[in-house]
Image (cartoon, rainbow, N blue to C red):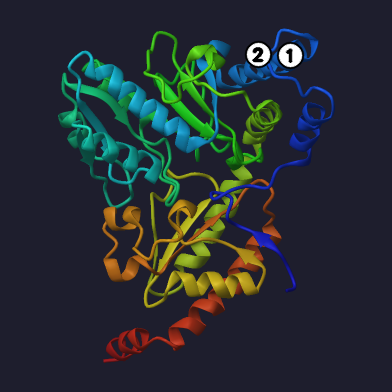
Amino acid sequence: MSRFVYADNAATTPVSQAVIDAMAPCFASAWGNPSSLHSKGREAKKLMDDARERIAKVFGCESGEIYFTSCGSESDNWAIKGAALRGKKKGRTHIVTTVIEHPAVLNTCRALEREGFEVSYIGVDADGVVDLAALEAAITEKTAVVAVMYANNEIGTIQPIEKICEMAHAKGALMFTDAVQAFGNVEIDLSKLPVDMLAMSGHKIHAPKGIGMLFVRKGTVLSNLIDGGGQEKRHRAGTENLPYIVGLAKAVEIAHEGLKDMPRVTAMRDRLIEALTAIPYSRLNGHRTKRLPGNVNVGFECIEGESMLLLLDMKGICASTGSACSSASLEPSHVLLAIGVPHEKAHGSIRLSISRETTDEDVDYIIETLTPIVARLREMSPLWEEIVKNSNK
């Protein structure tokens, strides 16, 4: 293996040394329970309160609107179930979402359907942008919550969240967005973005796995997902994970500071897209420009994505075929099917998610490595042989 290139940042990111250093005191000395009244407890609570304040400052919101969770999936579950159960008390038994949401949202909605809620799943266009006319028509006076992700985790398409907020609020519904992929890649200012709830996850921004956050705008009331003690203002029980909370605060600050580097990441993304889509019978999945800076998702006809991944891995390149949460499934991506990629072609897509850590030399290496891999796999494919034969007629 001559080189190592990590291009799967949408799945997870390595914990940065600065985050590890920030967490260290919580293991060595400040290991108290923030709920304890003695000196060790007060020391821990001060660190937790400080972390909450720092995160709120980055997001442009009040510290009391920040709730710590275990991950993005928990935040998604809490936001949607909490809003739905609260809305049910007012006769609101309807939820609106899209067909390309993360499984944490889709499966939460399906669980609520089994509890008697009605869910409208709105389609998207060929670029993965939600059908705004259909979405607006679906929202009624019975809608409790509209859940639309800020940016898609597979194809990187960014949604018009502000416009969707207007539609939801016009009918009195709450608006929730899963911003797990978006934060750290695009500017998110909650003093301007009128969402009622927003989820993010630490391990996408170089914090550890096992820590997430849910923003709940002041005045928004949710039913609890986890009951127990009085932590998180009695809304999310469980002893707070202080080291990871402190680590999350540091990671949030670093990610926000790193937004200034996104033009360079976007330029590398575009260079990858141009090179890979120049390969015959390839296709860019997702919007060409309204997409996350580091997301490249390209499909190649007559190839299995898993074969590409294995050969890339042998060359030291880490990539994926889509969501890491669905990697055990043999079914084609629900996102690719939703944007109109035929079933037989959806298997041949690869996702490369680069970051500020990626270099131009890394991009060069991906291009010079992946191009011959595509050619090699096609030489082994009887389907490709048929395409070549037909093209020569």
Mark linked to residue 226: none
Secondary element at image label 2: loop
Q: CA distance from mark 1 to mark 2?
A: 6 Å
> The C terminus appears in which quarter of the rendering?
bottom left
Give the residue furthest to the front: 228
Residue at position x 76%, y 31% in the image: 23
Q: Which residue is identified by label 1? A: 41
Q: Earlier in the sequence, mark 1 or mark 2?
A: 2
Closer to us: 129 or 110: 110
- Residue at the image position 77 percent from the left and 24 percent from the top: 31
Residue 353 placement, left or right of 322: right
Assess disc 1: are there few (<14), some (14-19) or many (≥20) residues with their C-alpha within 10 Å of its C-alpha: some
Counting from the top left corner in percent of width and height, residue 275 is at 52, 66
- Secondary element at tag 1: helix
Classify residue 175 by image quadrant.
top left
Q: Position of residue 149 (x, y in %)?
A: 39, 36
Mark 2: amino acid: Ser
Say how many tags the image has.
2
Vertical relation: 281 (above or below) 355: below
Whole-percent x, y for residue 160 in the image: 35, 33
Do the numbered discs 1 and 2 sit on residues whose CB atoms are within 8 Å?
Answer: yes
Q: Is residue 55 above or below residue 256?
A: above
Lateral position of residue 257 relative to residue 204, left or right: right
Amino acid identity at mark 1: Gly
Residue placed most toward the observer, 54 or 221? 221
Residue placed under numbered mark 2 in the picture: 35
Left or right for 256, reference 243: left
Left or right for 338, reference 156: left
- The answer, for residue 61, to whether it is visible in the render is no
Residue visible at 30% across and 17% down in the picture = 86
